[in-house]
């Protein structure tokens, strides 16, 4: 575990710079306990276990670097080196800091939200292999509910056909040179995207979408944490019964 840079052909940038305001807690959401470990520890462990990932760049608030070493990384003792990177003012800036810390500009980078602890090794493998073929790939799930577009008065303007609508998740994986170029241009033009894939979309670069999982939730609210606890206990009960 170190504070610095490292090179690899497939790098993971795990972003955990959020303040957790919607969680209504004095503790940042990424450090809340799930089972016996912080949420962020579970996320890092998933990437540490993947044989495809050779470098992990963990982006956290600058004031939390030492805390993450002792409270997030030490309990799981990662086999891979984890480079700690100070975060930015918002998520996109934090991702950019993570990208700038990577030395290997010819490889693939897998970007993931630190508060999505239920990402599986199979999904990491799928998004990496897709990126090797197509250059850019993210995971997501098809919209299941009826979608309504409303007007400025809060009334339904029309129903949106959901057949081609997907809900984006992370990880999102890219050839490094593509995502770095997209972030560089966004920074120079003052553009803030809704996710990393959107920065490529605005440049006309096609991004492949592949199936994720409903369990790959992003923990941002107290309700999300309750759901995460349920998923965690169900998965562990299933493991004990097999």
Image (tube, rainbow, N blue to C red):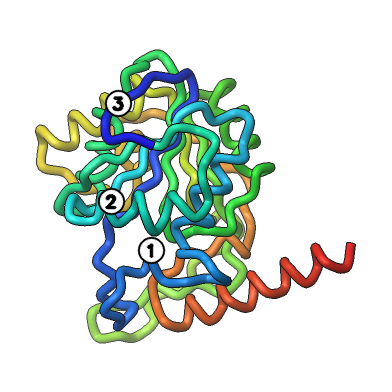
Q: Which residue is mark 3?
A: 5
| x 65%, y 43%: residue | 121
Q: Which residue is mark 2?
A: 60
Mark 2, secondary structure of its residue: strand
Q: Are marks 1 and 3 in contact (CB under 8 Å)?
A: no
Q: Are marks 1 and 2 in contact (CB under 8 Å)?
A: yes
Q: CA distance from mark 1 to mark 2?
A: 10 Å
Would residue 115 appear left or right of 240 to someone viewing this image?
left
In this rendering, the answer to whether 181 lies above or below 198 is: above
Dot 3 or dot 2: first in sequence order is 3
Mark 1, secondary structure of its residue: helix
User: In which quadrant will I find the C terminus?
Assistant: bottom right
Mark 3, secondary structure of its residue: loop
| x 24%, y 55%: residue | 64
| Mark 1 neighbour class, 10 Å CA radius: few under 14, some 14 to 19, many 20 or more | many
In this rendering, the answer to whether 45 lies above or below 184 is: below
Q: CA distance from mark 1 to mark 3?
A: 23 Å
Taking depth in this image into account, of 225 and 178 the one nearest to the observer is: 225
Dot 1 or dot 3: first in sequence order is 3
Q: Which residue is mark 1?
A: 30
| Mark 2 neighbour class, 10 Å CA radius: few under 14, some 14 to 19, many 20 or more | many
* Residue 40 percent coordinates (x, y): 44, 57
Would residue 13 appear left or right of 45 to someone viewing this image?
left
| x 46%, y 35%: residue | 110
Taking depth in this image into account, of 167 and 227 the one nearest to the observer is: 227
| x 36%, y 43%: residue | 58
In this rendering, the answer to whether 71 lies above or below 223 is: above
In this rendering, the answer to whether 134 lies above or below 89 is: above
| Residue 168 seen in the figure | no
| Mark 3 neighbour class, 10 Å CA radius: few under 14, some 14 to 19, many 20 or more | some
Residue 82: name its quadrant: top left
* Residue 39 percent coordinates (x, y): 47, 63
């Amino acid at each position: 575990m170190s504070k610095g840079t490292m090179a690899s052909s497939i790098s993971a940038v795990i972003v955990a710079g959020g303040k957790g305001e919607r969680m209504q807690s004095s503790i940042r959401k990424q450090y809340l306990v799930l089972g016996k470990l912080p949420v962020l520890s579970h996320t890092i462990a998933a990437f540490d276990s993947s044989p495809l990932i050779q470098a992990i760049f963990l982006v956290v608030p600058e004031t939390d670097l030492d805390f993450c070493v002792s409270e997030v990384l030490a309990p799981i003792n990662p086999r891979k080196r984890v480079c700690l990177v100070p975060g930015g003012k918002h998520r996109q800036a934090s991702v950019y800091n993570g990208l700038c810390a990577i030395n290997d500009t010819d490889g693939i980078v897998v970007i993931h939200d630190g508060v999505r602890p239920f990402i599986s090794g199979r999904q990491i493998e799928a998004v990496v292999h897709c990126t090797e073929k197509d250059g850019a790939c993210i995971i997501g799930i098809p919209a299941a509910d009826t979608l309504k577009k409303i007007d400025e008065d809060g009334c339904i303007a029309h129903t949106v056909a959901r057949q081609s609508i997907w809900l984006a998740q992370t990880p999102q994986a890219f050839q490094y040179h593509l995502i770095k170029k997209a972030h560089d241009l966004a920074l120079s033009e003052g553009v803030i995207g809704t996710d990393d894939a959107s920065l490529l979309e605005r440049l006309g670069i096609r991004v492949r979408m592949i199936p994720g999982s409903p369990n790959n939730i992003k923990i941002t609210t107290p309700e999300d944490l309750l759901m995460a606890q349920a998923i965690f206990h169900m998965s562990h009960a299933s493991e004990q019964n097999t």
